[in-house]
Amino acid sequence: MGSERGFTFVEVLVVMAVLSFGVLGVLQTTLLAARLELRSRAITTGTFLAQERLERIGALGWERATAGLISATLPEALGRGGTWLQEEIVRPGGRFLVAYEREAPSAEPPRCTVHCFWESARGGFDPRQVVRLSLRRRR
């Protein structure tokens, strides 16, 4: 029996275990990359939406740019009280909530801030997933 060639059962099991760990590592890295790509897409889209809204405010003024928006309380999960002008936008990158904030008109010039929240992977809006951009419009 000493002249037989081949692998023992234990050697095959060890090789299978090593290969399994390698494949699991690659799979885990691929899943992480996919999750980060989705997050990156949401950040990019949120930044684009906030910038687009601020440019509209700068060009048209607060009253004209925000005409037709609903005034409502933000979702409780966002931890912000009061009523805000807001709009919900669905894009291929996900669902976004754009909220508008303006300093008191007595401030010269008043600062306008656009908050763009995006829906988390678990559903609902997360206060940590937000892009905030501000503008002081000269009169």
Image: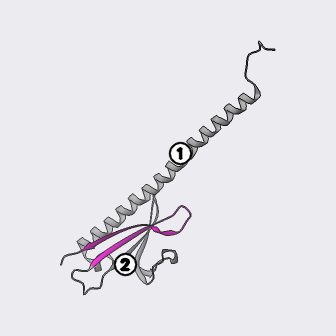
The kind of secondary structure element at disc 1 is helix
The location of residue 25, given as percent across then percent down, is 58, 42
The image quarter in which residue 44 lies: bottom left
Left or right of 47 in this view: 75? right
The quadrant of the image that shows the N terminus is top right
Q: How many numbered discs sit on the rendered protein?
A: 2
Q: Are marks 1 and 2 in contact (CB under 8 Å)?
A: no
Left or right of 4 in this view: 44? left
Q: Which mark is residue 68?
A: 2
Q: CA distance from mark 1 to mark 2?
A: 43 Å
Query: At 19% from the left edge and 76% from the top edge, which residue is drawn?
Result: 138
Residue 123 magenta-drawn?
A: yes
Residue type for callout 1: Thr
Q: Which residues are the magenta region?
A: 111-136
The kind of secondary structure element at disc 2 is loop
Q: Is residue 33 above or below residue 90?
A: above
Disc number lying in front (1 or 2): 1
Residue 116 magenta-drawn?
A: yes
10 Å crowding of disc 2: few (<14), some (14-19), many (20+): few
Specify the color scheme: one colour
Between 131 and 50, the one lying in front of the other is: 131
The residue beneath circle 1 is: 30
